[in-house]
Image (cartoon, rainbow, N blue to C red):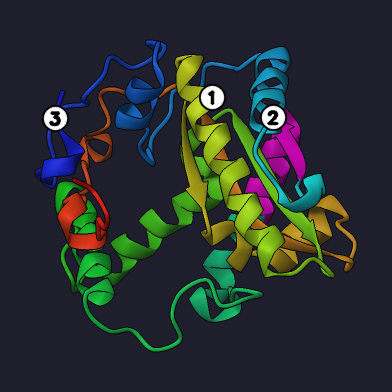
Amino acid sequence: MSNPFRGEPAHGALPFAAGVCATTIEEALLTRRSLRAFRPDPVPRATVAEILALASRAPSGTNIQPWKVRVLAGSERDRLSKAMVDAYLSQGEEGFKYPYNYYPVKWREPYLGRRRKVGWDLYGLLGLTRDNKEGMARQHARNYMFFGAPVAMIFTIDHDMELGSWLDYGMFLENIMLAARGKGLDTCPQAAIAAAHKVVREVLAIPESENIVCGMALGYADPDAIENGLVTVREPVEQFAQFMGFE
């Protein structure tokens, strides 16, 4: 298995067998990746419910547990996907704006370089060049198909929750992704779903009192999909951590 703490190549074989359960926390952490191609095999409702129950053990300030989830499969997942894809193809990115500032308002290094690298590494695997705007748009539209995953999750938070609750929410989302690995499942957290918030709100009748945080695809990885060969680089610990007071 490749070691993410030493940095990784931009692509390569899956570092785990698709559908195999992670048996330790370390294995779940090392094999969790944002995959962009799934098999259509259904995931039982009971399995998803168990994953969410495990994830709900995430800490939250004074235990307020600010998360809300809509879990979609079958025709309901297809209905939302169709509405989002139709809207995206007709409106383009100009019609899909985040309801909050997910990314920096002004990009700078090292964050801009990291963002560009992962984007072009993915497009390179797919054979998409910078001038192939149509191809890149089609790939982006796959977000709204949940990359073929049989289960789609939409996450919301009450609009009067503050920054601390959004931080708590991140721990809940990570727990879902790790718990999924323990079931032999994979995920892709999707900020792009928040950009489609107007469509999502209308299709799922989500009240204005809830902010759409993001979406997530859940299912069994397609081991033959070339895009699932993407392995992102991680900075070494020494680059982002300072150790003080150790002997």
Kindly report which numbered mark, 1 or 2, lies closer to the viewer in this rendering. Answer: 1
The 10 Å Cα crowd at callout 3, few under 14, some 14 to 19, many 20 or more, is: some
Q: Quadrant of residue 200?
A: bottom right
Magenta span: 68-83
Which labelled disc corresponds to residue 179?
A: 1
Q: Which residue is mark 2?
A: 73
Task: Tell me which label, 1 or 3, sits earlier in the chain.
Answer: 3
Vertical side of 115 occupied by 53: above or below: above
Q: Is residue 98 left or right of residue 245?
A: right
Which amino acid lies under the numbered mark 1 shown in the image of this protein? Answer: Ala
Type of residue at label 2?
Ala
Label 2 vs label 3, nearer the camera: 3
Position of the N terminus by quadrant: top left
Distance CA(mark 2)–CA(mark 3) = 33 Å
Image disc number at residue 2: 3
* Residue at the far bottom in the pictured view: 106
- Quarter that holds the C terminus: top left
Q: Is residue 198 left or right of residue 85?
A: right
In this view, 222 is above or below 202: above
Magenta region includes residue 77: yes
Q: Is residue 121 magenta?
A: no
